[in-house]
């Protein structure tokens, strides 16, 4: 019998009944391993009321105490990271090493949040006018909402909640219903670290509970990562209801390869960035833009590496695991079929891979296209699977124009040994995160993550200094403590 997963509210697993639920699959076997309860708006409202009370007390807790809890959480998370990684592999399908890397990158944000006293320091100006001082402070918002995607069930929520909690907020996390177990383990770890009950809550569900979060007046902000159409909906609906919103959307990340690049490095990077996590990454490289005459050579090197990759169960030492659901696998396969129909050259076909795992798993092997044109759906759309497209261009300028004309502007990379070309690229490219001979330019936690154009709705990126500002509100205080021998009444505007 499969296990049942319910919400985590007020420091414990929710015991109430649910009239709606969903099945959770092991993508490597196709088997149902659990069911997850879906929350009603009433359950969300209960969680928000509890979080509001808990958040007020937590927001008034000293920075010293908050940091003690953050440090304890960091140590517990580090000690139990293999446990979280195993849960991710069992529900998402990515290989264990990739899952462990995800947790480690999330851990970096928790470490960053441990420095919150320094990050919350305001400014102080003494004597701006006679006897008057001015200083700034930052205060928590209250209850904040986080809606996270299936592809990084630990790392993406951790882009947000360590900073939200460190700055004194209470959190309502709505994880993906496809792989919710990592969030439940993290909730246990917060409790173990000494976080007061009600400050970190997990509520499961689908669009019903998402809409309830967007509309609930007790939730002051929404952080979201997902596809662009949903991100736009989240942003428009959330802001309409008076919330701060940071909604990170889709991507179509390009790798521009110049003729002077090290093609072995390029091939390694393209395979790693294109097929890691079965391409289910918003930072995956899905388009290699080859400045001629390098295309034939780099395609051959990529193909040599691809045929050596093993696809299979993430617990059995394979290089690449399955896709998250059968529906998603079929959707990605339909893009492969569309690419063939549109006239692209299918160099490596991953639709019927040899796998190290059950025949019932949601398999799609690494796939490579050549001669891809900008009007093809495999180029225009975010596929979110292990499909790499090669577009041939005649010059650097043509490659930059191609990248800049795409609707997405999440991440990009250039591979070259020419420092001047790299410097020009970072200045001219209209993309939020740039790699120079680095294929997946995810910033360190003390910088901020986010793209441009249709890859981001809202003005604030995730984690780093922008994350601290997103989860706090600024106040400026003008203060005067009068000398006993003050000058009396003066109705004029203060001038000195």
Image: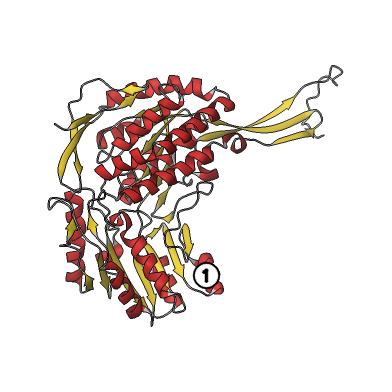
Q: Which image quadrant for residue 257?
A: bottom left
Q: Residue at x 44, y 19 (%)?
A: 53
Report the quarter where the N terminus lies.
top left
Report the quarter where the C terminus lies.
top right
Residue 414 shows in this picture: yes
Of 233 and 3, nearer the camera is 3
Q: Which image quadrant for residue 147?
A: top left
Q: Residues within 10 Å of mark 1 (few under 14, many from 20)?
A: some
Task: Judge from the rendering whether residue 138 lies leftward or rightward of residue 172; answer left or right.
Answer: right
Position of residue 22 relative to residue 342, above or below, is above
Of 351 and 488, nearer the camera is 351
Position of residue 24 relative to residue 263, above or below, is above
Residue 9 lies, in percent from the top left, at 34, 24
Residue 148 shows in this picture: no
Residue 135 lies, in percent from the top left, at 69, 33
Position of residue 146 relative to residue 396, above or below, is above
Q: Residue at x 55, y 22 (%)?
A: 60
Q: Which image quadrant for residue 119?
A: top right
Dot 1 falls on a residue whose secondary structure is: helix
Q: Please tell me how many numbered marks the rendered image carries.
A: 1
Position of residue 231 relative to residue 392, above or below, is above
Residue 475 lies, in percent from the top left, at 61, 32
Residue 289 lies, in percent from the top left, at 37, 72
Of 447 and 262, nearer the camera is 262
Mark 1 lies on residue: 422
Of 27 and 16, nearer the camera is 27
Residue at the far top: name it: 484
Q: Residue at x 32, y 57 (%)?
A: 276
């Amino acid at each position: 019998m499969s296990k049942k997963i319910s919400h985590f509210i007020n420091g414990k697993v929710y015991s109430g009944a649910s009239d709606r639920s969903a099945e959770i699959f092991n993508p490597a076997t196709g088997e149902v391993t659990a069911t997850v309860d879906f929350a009603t708006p009433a359950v969300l409202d209960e969680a928000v009321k509890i979080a509001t009370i808990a958040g007020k007390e937590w927001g008034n807790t000293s920075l010293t105490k908050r940091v003690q809890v953050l440090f304890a959480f960091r140590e517990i998370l580090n000690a139990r990271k293999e446990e979280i990684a195993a849960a991710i592999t069992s529900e998402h399908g990515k290989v264990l090493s990739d899952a462990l890397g995800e947790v480690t990158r999330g851990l970096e944000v928790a470490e960053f949040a441990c420095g919150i006293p320094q990050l919350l320091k305001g400014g102080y100006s003494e004597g701006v006018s006679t006897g008057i001082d001015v200083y700034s402070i930052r205060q928590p918002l209250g209850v904040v909402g986080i809606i996270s995607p299936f592809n990084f069930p630990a790392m993406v929520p951790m882009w947000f909640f360590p900073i939200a909690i460190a700055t004194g907020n209470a959190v309502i996390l709505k994880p993906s219903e496809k792989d919710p177990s990592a969030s439940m383990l993290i909730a246990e770890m917060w409790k173990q670290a000494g976080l007061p009950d009600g400050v970190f809550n997990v509520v499961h569900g689908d669009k019903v509970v998402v809409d309830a979060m967007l509309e609930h007046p007790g939730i002051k902000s929404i952080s979201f990562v997902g596809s662009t159409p949903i991100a736009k909906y989240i942003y428009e609906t959330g802001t309409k209801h008076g919330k701060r919103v940071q909604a990170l959307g889709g991507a179509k990340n390009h790798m521009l390869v110049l003729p002077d690049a090290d093609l072995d490095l390029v091939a390694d990077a393209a395979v790693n960035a294109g097929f890691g996590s079965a391409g289910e990454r918003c930072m995956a490289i899905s388009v290699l833009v080859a400045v001629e005459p390098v295309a034939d050579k780099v395609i051959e090197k990529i193909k040599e590496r691809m045929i050596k990759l093993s696809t299979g169960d993430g617990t059995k030492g394979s290089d690449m695991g399955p896709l998250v659901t059968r529906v998603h696998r079929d959707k990605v396969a339909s893009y492969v079929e569309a690419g063939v129909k549109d006239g692209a050259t299918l160099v490596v076909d991953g639709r019927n891979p040899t796998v190290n795992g059950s025949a019932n798993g949601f398999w799609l092997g690494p796939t490579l296209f050549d001669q891809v044109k900008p009007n093809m759906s495999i180029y225009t759309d975010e596929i979110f699977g292990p499909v790499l497209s090669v577009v041939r261009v005649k010059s650097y300028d043509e490659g930059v124009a191609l990248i800049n004309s795409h609707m997405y502007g999440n991440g990009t990379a250039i591979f070259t040994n020419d420092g001047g070309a790299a410097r020009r690229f970072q200045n001219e490219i209209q993309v939020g995160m740039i790699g120079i001979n680095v294929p997946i330019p995810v910033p360190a936690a003390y910088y901020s993550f986010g793209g441009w154009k249709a890859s981001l709705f809202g003005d604030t990126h995730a984690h780093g200094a922008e994350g601290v500002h997103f989860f706090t509100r600024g106040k400026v205080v003008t203060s005067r403590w009068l000398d006993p021998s003050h000058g009396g009444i003066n109705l004029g505007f203060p001038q000195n």
